[in-house]
Image: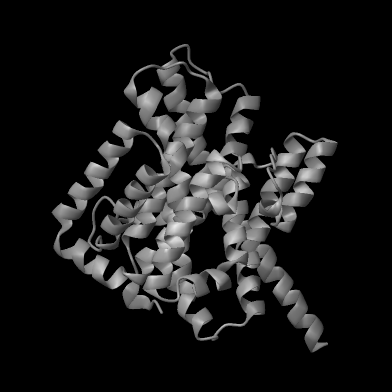
Amino acid sequence: MATKADRYEGIDGLKAYAIIGIALMHVLANGEYGIGGFVFERLIPSFTNLVFLFMMVSGFGMCCGYYQKIIDRKISVEDFYKKRYIKIWPYFALLCALDFVISPSKESLFEVFANLTLCQGLLPNAKISVIGVSWTLAVIFVFYMLFPFFCFLIENKKRAWGVAVAALMFNWLCSSYFSAGRGNIVYDAIYFIAGGLVFLYRKELVEFSSKHKVIAGAILLIATVVYFAVGGYTLMMLLFCVAALIYTLGCNRRGVLVNPIVKFLGGISFEIYLCHMVIYRVFEKLHLVHLFGNSLLAYIFTAVAVICGSVVFSVCAKWFLNKIETFLKERVRRVNHV
């Protein structure tokens, strides 16, 4: 089981940069700024695949927190699922309500209901527009539902490798035969399993990354170059994500991946991910996404404004929800003492 000594300081930095990249991509794609060049035609659009990095980090992080507890039966099924719902549901419900208020319709009401169950990831080929980016949350929550089974699958390294091969084959079949895309848990399973494999070898990988930082960095650089040279296929994305995660595990000193700013952003990265398109739609309705005649300047302004607005909203929303939680707990305590 992971302990305080196993705290991987660079993970927050990895999540922080991933969410900034995803936000940059969504603003560019939705704003239709028509800016050319490698950065705007290939680099930033490729950030859409950073959602797979989130999945791998989620698989690794869940194993750090719960793998040994599940294996040793030190946490009940009720406590496990309660923690998952309590962590996600209030904030997501608030976002769904805001999205519905901004664009109310009968269809949106149906989709809000599906979202609030957190079971929308079980729907076949669901295309939910209310908090559209939440398809990632839908997949991740299905992973939470299956996590006890996931622990069984990776209970030993030999079995885990066999499962990884099967998951990789299933990923290929999803796209080539079953017409199931990345919104499907079976398609995405390989990324969660890869995170679990990194967890199983974490001690060796931390030692390697810490002692051979230059080599780990070179491998990450090569993986990045190969990704752009070959294309964003599953194997290429796996290579990049695994290389990035391994490099991150060895980062425990102050630097690009370890500092107060990225620690703060990494701590609210998923909240930013869920809300940034809502913030973008607000700017869009206020006619601020093309505020300047220069497309590059308009994009930079909108991207910075959306990221900053998402950070402010995430912090304020969490503060608001914490206040409500405290108030309700106090009310229950008073009622129980009457």
List x then y, in percent, for residue 326: 66, 70
Q: What is the residue that sits farthest to the top in this orientation?
A: 293
Residue 267 visible to an observer of this rendering: no
Identify which residue, 193 or 43, lies in the foreground: 193
Residue 201 visible to an observer of this rendering: yes
Residue 88 left/right relative to 31: right
Quadrant in the picture for residue 24: top left
Quadrant in the picture for residue 226: top left
List x then y, in percent, for residue 331: 76, 75
Quadrant in the picture for residue 327: bottom right
Residue placed at 53% from the left, 18% from the top? 290
List x then y, in percent, for residue 99: 70, 40
Q: Is residue 161 above or below residue 333?
A: above
Colour scheme of the rendered structure: one colour
Residue 207 left/right relative to 246: left
Identify which residue, 83 or 152, lies in the foreground: 152
Residue placed at 61% from the left, 59% from the top? 141
Residue placed at 41% from the left, 79% from the top? 1
Identify which residue, 325 or 253, lies in the foreground: 253
Residue 309 left/right relative to 1: right
Q: Is residue 127 above or below residue 12?
A: above
Residue 105 left/right relative to 8: right
Residue placed at 74% from the left, 46% from the top? 97
List x then y, in percent, for residue 209: 21, 61
Q: Quadrant of the C terminus?
A: bottom right
Count every numbered label the image shows and give the total. 0
Identify which residue, 232 or 85, lies in the foreground: 232
Q: Is residue 97 above or below residue 338?
A: above
